[in-house]
């Protein structure tokens, strides 16, 4: 596999940060750096990877709380975020406070992730798919040539993203799952923001939130 996806899980919400590495070139990107970002940054340094970007699927605090940690080690690395998620990103301290966490603002994003965009990562690429419903401006990142998708909090093994937080919308989330996840090949490996990896086929067949809707009006 050209792309290796490494997981860095930490924090009270057991958030999965990912390090996507092109094995042939050493080019790397961090996706959703959370509470375990110091270890992620140290991995980049120790392996002398060609670190090119921080990619954010959405702006919930547990998925962005490590951006400042990454920037302390790599002060010039670009930070990519969908423009609809910028408001939530900037309100990071307030969002964290709702969960009893004291936090300071994160470094400002530098680039926009947009639907249909292609982010080159060495000899492979991630296509950006707009997938709102769990959070404003949520995107997923799909490397079709290696059957890998980084799906944030859209779908999990046996579950789906919550929609009771600000900006959440259940019908919108189900539409995103139907159009942006279930349209991928069955063997595509899904790397979610929490919990273990799964596949499109496993969720299409066995996810209790999707089974009853498969072939129906939602998913």
Image: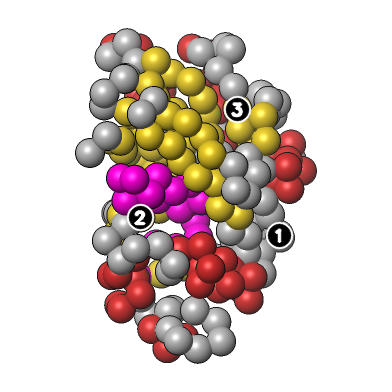
The number of numbered discs placed on residues in the rendered structure image is 3
Q: Which residue is mark 3?
A: 79
Residue 156 within the segment the image draws in magenta: yes
Frontmost of labels 3 and 1 is 3
Distance from Cα at disc 3 to Cα at disc 2: 22 Å
**Residue 138 image offset from top left, x and y in percent:** 61, 52
Residue at the (26%, 26%) spot, across then down: 23
Residue at the (49%, 56%) spot, across then down: 153
Q: Nearer the viewer, residue 66 or 50?
A: 50
Q: Which residue is mark 1?
A: 166
Label 2: how many Cα within 10 Å (few below 14, some 14–19, many 20+):
many
Q: Which residue is mark 2?
A: 190
Q: Nearer the viewer, residue 165 or 167?
A: 167
In primary-sequence order, the first of circles 2 and 1 is 1
Indicate the quadrant containing the N terminus: top left, top right, bottom left or bottom right. Answer: top left
Distance from Cα at disc 3 to Cα at disc 1: 23 Å
With respect to residue 172, does 197 lie above or below? above
Magenta stretch in the rendered image: 138-158
**Residue 62 image offset from top left, x and y in percent:** 53, 43
In primary-sequence order, the first of circles 3 and 2 is 3
Residue at the (69%, 46%) spot, across then down: 85
Label 3: how many Cα within 10 Å (few below 14, some 14–19, many 20+):
many
At mark 1, the secondary structure is loop
Task: Name the mark on residue 146.
Answer: none
In primary-sequence order, the first of circles 3 and 1 is 3
Residue at the (68%, 54%) spot, across then down: 136
With respect to residue 92, does 72 lie above or below? above
Write down the quadrant of residue 186 in the picture.
bottom left
**Residue 27 image offset from top left, x and y in percent:** 38, 21
Distance from Cα at disc 2 to Cα at disc 1: 25 Å
Write down the quadrant of residue 41 in the picture.
top left
């Amino acid at each position: 596999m050209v792309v290796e996806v490494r997981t860095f899980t930490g924090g009270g919400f057991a958030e999965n940060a990912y390090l996507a590495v092109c094995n042939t070139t050493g080019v790397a990107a961090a996706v959703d750096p959370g509470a375990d970002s110091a270890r992620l940054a140290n991995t980049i340094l120790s392996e002398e990877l060609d670190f090119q970007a921080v990619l954010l699927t959405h702006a919930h605090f547990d998925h962005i709380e490590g951006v400042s940690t990454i920037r302390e080690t790599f002060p010039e690395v670009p930070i990519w975020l969908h423009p609809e998620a910028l408001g939530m990103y900037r309100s990071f301290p307030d969002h964290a406070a709702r969960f009893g966490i004291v936090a300071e603002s994160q470094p400002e994003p530098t680039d926009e992730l947009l639907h249909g965009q292609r982010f080159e990562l060495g000899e492979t690429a991630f296509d950006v798919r707009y997938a709102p419903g769990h959070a404003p401006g949520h995107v997923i990142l799909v490397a079709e040539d290696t059957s890998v998708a980084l799906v944030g909090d859209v779908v999990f093994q046996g579950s789906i993203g919550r929609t009771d937080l600000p900006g959440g919308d259940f019908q919108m989330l189900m539409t995103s799952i139907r159009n942006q996840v279930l349209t991928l090949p069955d063997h595509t490996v899904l790397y979610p923001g929490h919990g273990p990896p799964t596949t499109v086929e496993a969720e299409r067949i066995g996810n209790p939130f999707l089974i009853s809707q498969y072939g129906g009006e939602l998913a």
